[in-house]
Image: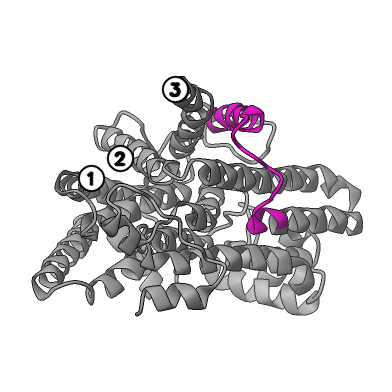
Amino acid sequence: MYNRIATFLLVELPLYAFVASITFETANNHGDLETSTNFTIARMFGYIFAASAILAPHIHFRKIPRPAVLLLVFTVVVFARIAGIPEYMWPSAMDLVGRLFQEAIMVWLICNVIRAFPYTYKRILGVYAFAAITIAILQILSVTSTETSQAGRVTMFADDPNTACGKFGLAAVICVVTLLSSRSRVWLRAIAGLALIPLTLTMVGTGSRGGLLAFLIGSMVACAPLLFEGSTPARIGRFVMIVAVFSGLAAAVLTNETALDRINEARGGDLALRESIYPADFIVVTNHPFFGAGPIQNYDEVGDEASTILSSNSTENTFLWSLTAVGIIGSAPFFAAVGAALIAAWRARKTSLGWMPLAFLSCALAFSCTIEWHGQKPLWLALAMAYSSIYAATSRVATISHGATAVPVSFAAPSALSSRFPA
């Protein structure tokens, strides 16, 4: 009993505080996350969690998770590439390296905590969703909402509206999967369904087209296969719930003039300069295919090719940023880390976790295709949760036959797993 309480206070509580603070990271920073020297609530809790996890006697760090190793290698590659850019860009580039290093360490820590305490997996998702739902309600009540320079778009704590929508979208995906899962308790499914109302209204209020699209992609990753699982009444029930969720989203968009106008602009080809930036990204990649134009310097080259000023210093795509910064060879570790997380999430679909890891990661990756998220904590969390599903997942059959006893599933042999759980 004493050890359990000590573990909760010294390890779990700092982790939950860090995860919850991700949703309101810019609360005391006026939306400015450009440099790692800025103090944020999430950074403070992140340091506390890192210290507590490292000092915890029951958590072993001798085996580093594969994505963390690959992300560390990627960080070293970006650091080495700095030598080829002008010296006045070095401070900004070093700040970027610092954030990438933090990403690798945080993925490492979260994965190892879940390895030591598998029950924390679902609690982490629950804490993140609860924090986002709380902020969404406060947004509707105009307690935390702030208007942006773009008329009609509303965000929280002066955060970028696209980033805010991405954070809410991840929480909404958690709620959608919980609502559709037959393994969730009735009261939890009811709460998830009700929570989608403020989350949907808040997402639409940001006017982020990419955020809404990422939410739809993440939701469909879970919705599509669940329509073919279970008995006929269960399928019909899920279909009705899916129609209700997407109908609610459509109604929210149709009744929000700003969101509707932005969608119509996208249909007309106006993608907020992305229609010029994306082709320029590919031109820079073809000009520097193997090792890229260099971090920070890639923004200048993309801006020159796009014949526009990149006021946000962004390639507007996490993966194209990597390719333009360090090229195909330099980006290989980053893409491999994402691939390892995807494989782990895919294998977890036939376990007690179901489609949650894959849907959560799919939403994050889809949103990363519309904005640079490599330095943002929601993507770090998504990668960590996807890969650590191999530690938290338990066999559906074993869980049913052994009651409350959790029987870990080995992902070392995919063929063995598929034979135990035929498709």
Question: Could you classify mark 2 by the number of other residues whose Cα lies within 10 Å: few (under 14), some (14-19), or many (20 or more)?
Answer: many
Position in image of residue 290 (x %, y %): 81, 75
- Indicate the amino acid at tag 2: Ile
Colour convention:
one colour
Point 38% across, 46% down: residue: 122
Numbered disc 2: secondary structure: helix
**Residue in view at x 71 percent, y 45 percent:** 62
In the rendered view, tell whether residue 91 sits above or below residue 81. above
Report the amino acid beneath label 1.
Ala
Q: Considering the image in quadrants, where does the N terminus appear?
A: top left
Graded by Cα atoms within 10 Å as few (under 14), some (14 to 19) or many (20 or more), the crowding at tag 3 reads few
Q: Is residue 47 magenta?
A: yes
Q: Earlier in the sequence, mark 1 or mark 3?
A: 3
Does residue 30 appear in the picture of this structure?
A: yes
In the displayed orientation, state which residue is furthest to the left: 233
The tag on residue 5 is 3
In this rendering, the label closer to the viewer, 1 or 3: 3
Q: Earlier in the sequence, mark 2 or mark 3?
A: 3
Residue positioned most to the front: 402
Q: Which residue is mark 1?
A: 195
Residue hosting label 2: 133
Q: Is residue 248 above or below residue 217?
A: above
Q: Tag 1, which secondary structure?
A: helix
Q: Give the residues in magenta.
A: 41-69
Q: Is residue 227 above or below residue 26?
A: below
* Among numbered discs 1 and 2, the one appearing first in the sequence: 2
Distance in Å between CA atoms under marks 2 and 3: 27 Å
Magenta stretch containing residue 26, yes or no? no
In terms of secondary structure, where does tag 3 sit?
A: helix
Q: Residue furthest top?
A: 2
Overall secondary structure of the magenta stretch?
helix
